[in-house]
Amino acid sequence: MKKIATFSLLGVLLAAAPPLAIAQESGRAQAAAPAFKAKKLTRAEFDALRANPSKLLVVDVRRPDELQSIGGFGAYLSIQANELEKSLAWIPKDRTIVTVSNHAARAGRAADLLTNNGFTVAGAVGAQDYEGEGGTLVKVVAPPPRQSSN
């Protein structure tokens, strides 16, 4: 009798496995979906925007150590993601903005914040994704420490 109950329980578990697997896959898909509305730009799309630098403002929301270790783009406004909302007043509104982070997650959220505050935003780009698609990043070298004049 115990074997029948065990087999029945095993049958119930096996029968439930496919929906459970589907639910897990659905959860993974939701986790992989971006947590922002901004367009994630490809290398080609970003390069096309960079072709007209007088109309573009690149806002890099990464920390200085990330810029130094990973690299970035030649001309950009550096505002860390956690400081962006406090800095809105001095960001120019006369240019199209592209936000940058490593893989565009923070950049996407920053782009949404800027869009919600009346800025024209083309989208978000990930520096590492850009490099992975064949783009070239500029390596930022930290200046040497200042020498004391004593």
Image (spheres, rainbow, N blue to C red):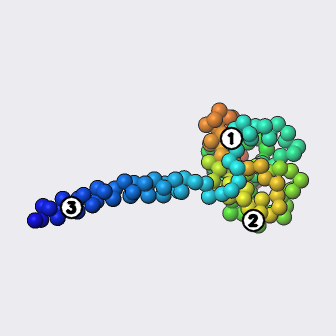
Q: Which residue is mark 1?
A: 42
Rendering quarter of residue 148: bottom right
At 61% from the left and 54% from the top, the residue drawn is 34
Give x and y (percent) for residue 79. Answer: 74, 57
Image location (x, y in percent) of residue 107: 68, 53
Along the line of sight, which residue is nearer the eye, 136 or 118?
A: 118
Q: Marks 1 and 3: which is nearer the front? A: 3
Q: Which residue is mark 2?
A: 85
Q: Of the residues under marks 1 and 3, which one precedes in the sequence?
A: 3
Of 109 and 13, which appears nearest the observer?
13
> Marks 3 and 2: in contact by CB < 8 Å?
no
Q: Residue visible at 80% across and 41% down?
A: 49
Who's the residue at 71% across and 53% down the image? 38
Q: Nearer the viewer, mark 1 or mark 2?
A: 1
The kind of residue tagged 1 is Thr
Residue beneath disc 3? 8
